[in-house]
Amino acid sequence: FLERERGWARKVDLVVTANDAYADLLAPLLQVSRPLVVRNCLDAWDPPADRSPDHLREAIGLESSVAVVLYQGGLLTDRGIEEGMEAILAVPAAHLAVLGFGAYRDRYAAMARDARYRSRVTLLPPVPPAELLAWTASADVMLMAIQPTSLNHRYTTPQKLWEAIAAGVPVVASDLPGMAEVVTELRCGVLCDPTDPA
């Protein structure tokens, strides 16, 4: 299949990708000139200055003094949700909100009901895309601890990173090439070892 992809890449006028890490990977892999990087950024958005409405705290029933860590996106394996659930237990006065849908929804719902996580983790249903930035803006921190289990995961710059930036929410992101490049450049959060909840 790689030979077919190389053939296609050589026939086009330009190969485009989402970040520098992918570009550096794809050039030798596809045996083409370094692809043009076009970041998948969102349009400019002005978050409410006073975090009103406070969607996440209202939906969960939290006091305004409780910090909300948000995971939003696909409820799938290797997204760092389990690691986030473990990590939140070590963060006093904070709550993990998991917002989204996907194949592992029932699994994460069962975990959130377990006594260990019941008062610290809440699984919320997805919201319409037009409302997502307002919900994101009501978080204190966005978690994206994607696990380094594939090339795609190692080099991804997930849409949720751009959503957090647009909403003005700092991130805790995996120290992997695709995300580290953006977080370091924009100084919009901290990088972590996604495999270690501590």
Image (cartoon, rainbow, N blue to C red):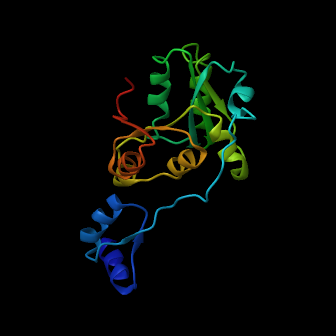
**Total labels drawn:** 0
119 vs 4, left or right, is right
> In the image as oriented, which residue stretches furthest toward the front?
49
Report x, y in % for residue 186: 42, 48
Q: Is residue 79 left or right of residue 48?
A: left
What residue is at 30 percent from the left and 72 percent from the top?
34
- Where is residue 10 shown, x and y percent of the image? 33, 83
Residue 178 at x, y percent in the picture: 37, 52
**In the rendered image, the vertical position of residue 137 relative to residue 82, given as above or below:** below
Horizontal side of 101 relative to 145 (left or right) equals right
Q: Is residue 171 above or below residue 2?
A: above
State the residue at coordinates (58%, 58%). 42
Quadrant where the C terminus sits is top left
Residue at 37% x, 81% y: name it: 8
Image side of residue 41 versus residue 130, left or right: left
Q: Nearer the viewer, residue 169 or 103?
A: 169
Does 126 appear above or below 109? below
Quarter of the figure with the N terminus: bottom left
In front: 165, or 82? 165
Q: Position of residue 180 (x, y in %)?
A: 36, 47
Which of the 4 quarters of the picture holds residue 47?
A: top right
Q: Quadrant of residue 66?
A: top right
Residue drawn where x is 67% and y is 46% of the image = 132
User: Taking the image as drawn, is residue 126 in sight?
Assistant: no
